Image: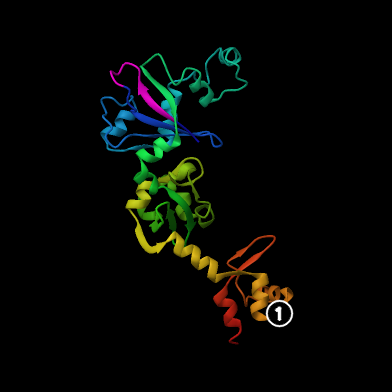
Amino acid sequence: MKVFAIRDEEAQETKDLAYLIYYEREKRFYIELPDDADFWETPLILSSFAKRGIKTVNAYWSKIWVQQRIVPPDRQNLGQILKDNGLKEYDEFELLMLADGRCAQDSYYLTEVSEKVLLNAFELRYQKRVEDVVPLTDCQLLVFFRDGMIHKCDVKALVGNNRQFAPVIKNREIFCTVEVQTGGYGVCWGENLNIPDSVLYESSQAIPLTDMDLRQYIYHRVIDTTEATGLLNCSRQNIEDLVRRGKLHPVKITHKIKLFLKSEIRQRLWK
């Protein structure tokens, strides 16, 4: 991850007006605005977010801001431009860095800063980023946040009548493909369907558990096949047979292991 302060060359004093974050592997941009952002000072496009009190600019609009500062991909002599600048292919980040984010339309520029600057400035904001997500039944999500809180989120209620989410709501298989967005900025289904972290945090039901509580539960209550054979004093073949006959129900199966709830294994001893 690279972090850049967005500054204005014509300003009387050096001031960080916003921060551009770039995730190199995913090639994704995000922009963070200070809590006291002045929309008169904030760069165009980003100022509309400042007016509405939105401090985190999503990946789509952050990318639009970047694209307005570089050569467009449909430029007629693009090949020669890339060659003249030592680039083998069109790369938005590399093109942005050629002039430190400057463009002819304004006086804003980028200067790289430490990640600690960003974390110190937005410590509370970053504590509410998404750490993990688990799909539940009835279009519910179990969302884990960096501050240790766990929320239960009703996706139907969060997306309302947004028809773009219809496939997610109606198809369980698609719903279960939910992932954490790059940087923890929310959850997503593919590139275009996402729910921001702020919406998930503030419009959902907090569960009186912490991430550490759940980790302890998994540590003490989930066991593998080897541990199951020890508790039941049987062979792995016996365990496999119980699974085939529907007498045991693994909570997770991979090509190498099966995981079980310890309580279900213990209950076999009662029969």
Question: Which residue, given by chain and number where applicable, does mark 1 sit on?
Answer: 234
The kind of residue on which mark 1 rests is Cys
Decide whether residue 6 is among the magenta residues: yes
> Which SS class for mark 1?
loop
Which residue: 33% across, 53% down? 203
Task: Find residue 87 and report its horizontal and vertical position in percent.
Answer: 60, 19
Mark 1 Cα shell of 10 Å, populated few (<14), some (14-19), many (≥20): few
Residue 252 versus residue 5 in the image, above or below = below
Horizontal relation, residue 240 to residue 89: left or right? right
Image location (x, y in percent) of residue 65: 41, 26
Q: Residue at x 43, y 44 (%)?
A: 185
Instruction: Answer with left or right where residue 89 lies relative to residue 136.
Output: right
Residue 58, visible in the rendered structure: no
Q: Position of residue 197 (x, y in %)?
A: 39, 47
Number of residue marks: 1
Residue 67 inside the magenta-drawn segment: no
**Residue 234 pos. (x, y %):** 71, 79
Does residue 181 appear in the picture of this structure?
yes
Q: Is residue 18 above or below residue 98?
A: below
- Pick the quarter of the image with the C terminus: bottom right
Asked whether 117 or 193 is in front, the reply is 117
Above or below — where is 107 with respect to 239?
A: above
Task: Look at 40% across and 13% down and name the residue there.
Answer: 104
Question: Which stretch appears magenta?
Answer: 4-13
Quarter of the view holding residue 11? top left
> With 266 as the anchor, is 181 left or right in this view?
left
Q: How is the image coloured?
A: rainbow
